């Protein structure tokens, strides 16, 4: 997928959001960091230069989200805050980036819970297939308002020196494979690439697959050489990473939602002056709808491009509800495994989240 195509889509999504007035001001160019004595940054002329790492590349949802986030912080602070945004691999692997955030080597990161499942076990809740609402609009509302996620789960991450500022969707997950995947039997002996989450791996074992943990930076070659047979991702990511070029089949399964977290190092954040924290918090809120529109535009547009690609044809199949039910039947028992094996608060968090989902879907 060409970058200029992504840029056009990204621009379309961002132009639909509100234009925001800049605020603040400061003239020091000392590189910034924490202010002294809790004084207002506007009052003491402090400036800030921060790092924001993502798990995706230029043109993909996380990177474009981070770029817009950085742009708004700079505008609101009248240049007082600047932020360098890093593509995946710029500062290491997904795991490296989490460690850098925890240590304070970077201030902000977009983190996928699937890469922290062995650290915050309860975060594996996002690995439970057929749990989140099928309607992405409802999932968007859930991620914005859920107490189970934004308070209970977030507190567990903060205990591990990661402060979630928001949970947001990058779109429904789909399967690609070197063979058609329309029923659980199709996964028998299938080498499925997964993130480093015990629950994700167990979920695919329930289908009969052979899960294999692999960084996405190695995934294209892994699919091309047959080291793994298939993978799961939102449509935009499949297209931009060109996985469809080395996979003959794509299944529109909508079996899960790819959830990302906008995070900050809590010690860094808590030491900031109140006016700077207010700018960050305000921008986080604005980016909820911006991020949703961005992923929605990209996923819808790029599905058509995959379907119409004659040079690298991919057979696209959408599962019927009856076919999805066959997978759902095997996925639901994994909720009990999550409650029993994913940390002390797993049961409480899942029960609360299921109640919140039921309430939203019943509105």
Image: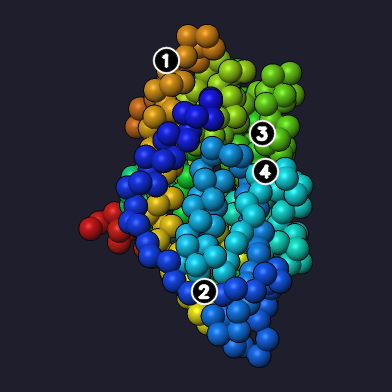
Q: Nearer the viewer, residue 143 or 284?
A: 284
Quadrant of residue 358 in the image?
bottom left
Name the residue rendered at 66%, 33% in the picture.
193
As helix, strand or loop, the secondary structure at mark 3 comes to strand
Residue density around tag 1, few if under 14, some if 14–19, many if 20 or more, within 10 Å: few
> Residue 270 in the image: x percent, y percent?
61, 79
Decide which of tag 3 and tag 1 comes sooner along the chain.
3
As helix, strand or loop, the secondary structure at mark 2 comes to loop
Residue density around tag 4, few if under 14, some if 14–19, many if 20 or more, within 10 Å: many
Decide which of tag 2 and tag 4 comes sooner along the chain.
2
Residue assigned mark 4: 88
Q: Which mark is residue 362?
A: none
Name the residue rendered at 67%, 59% in the picture.
51
Query: Distance of mark 1 from mark 2, alpha carbons?
Result: 50 Å
As helix, strand or loop, the secondary structure at mark 1 comes to loop
Q: Nearer the viewer, residue 83 or 267?
A: 83
Q: Which mark is residue 25?
A: 2
Query: Distance of mark 4 from mark 3, alpha carbons?
Result: 18 Å
| Circles 1, 2 touching at the beta carbon (< 8 Å) | no
């Amino acid at each position: 997928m060409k970058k200029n195509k992504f840029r056009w889509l990204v621009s379309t999504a961002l132009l639909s959001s509100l234009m925001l007035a800049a605020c603040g001001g400061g003239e020091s160019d000392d590189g910034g960091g924490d202010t002294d004595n809790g004084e207002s940054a506007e009052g003491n002329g402090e400036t800030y230069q921060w790092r924001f790492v993502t798990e995706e590349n230029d043109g993909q949802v996380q990177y474009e989200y981070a770029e817009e986030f950085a742009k708004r912080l700079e505008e609101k602070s009248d240049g007082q805050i600047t932020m360098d945004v890093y593509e995946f691999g710029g500062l290491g692997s997904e795991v490296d980036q989490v460690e850098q955030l925890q240590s304070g080597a970077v201030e902000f990161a977009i983190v996928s819970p699937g890469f922290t499942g062995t650290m915050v076990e309860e975060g594996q809740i996002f690995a439970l297939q057929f749990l989140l609402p099928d309607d992405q609009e409802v999932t968007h509302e859930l991620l914005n308002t859920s107490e189970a996620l934004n308070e209970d789960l977030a507190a567990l991450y903060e205990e591990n020196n990661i402060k979630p500022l928001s949970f947001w969707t990058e779109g429904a997950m789909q399967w690609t494979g070197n063979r058609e995947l329309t029923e659980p039997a199709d996964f028998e002996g299938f080498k499925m690439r997964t993130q480093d989450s015990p629950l994700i791996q167990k979920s695919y074992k329930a289908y009969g697959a052979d899960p294999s943990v692999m960084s996405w930076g190695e995934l294209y070659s892994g699919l091309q050489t047959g080291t793994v047979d298939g993978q799961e991702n939102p449509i935009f990511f499949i297209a931009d990473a060109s996985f469809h070029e080395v996979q003959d089949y794509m299944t529109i399964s909508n079996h899960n939602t790819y959830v990302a977290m906008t995070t900050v190092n809590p010690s860094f954040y808590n030491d900031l002056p109140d006016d700077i924290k207010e700018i960050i918090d305000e921008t986080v809120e604005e980016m909820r709808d911006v991020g949703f529109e961005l992923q929605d535009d990209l996923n819808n547009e790029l599905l058509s491009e995959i379907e119409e690609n004659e040079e690298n044809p991919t057979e696209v199949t959408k599962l019927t509800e009856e076919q999805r039910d066959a997978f759902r039947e095997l996925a639901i028992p994994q909720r009990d495994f999550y409650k029993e094996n994913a940390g002390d608060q797993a049961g409480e968090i899942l029960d609360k989240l299921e109640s919140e989902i039921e309430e939203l879907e019943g509105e």
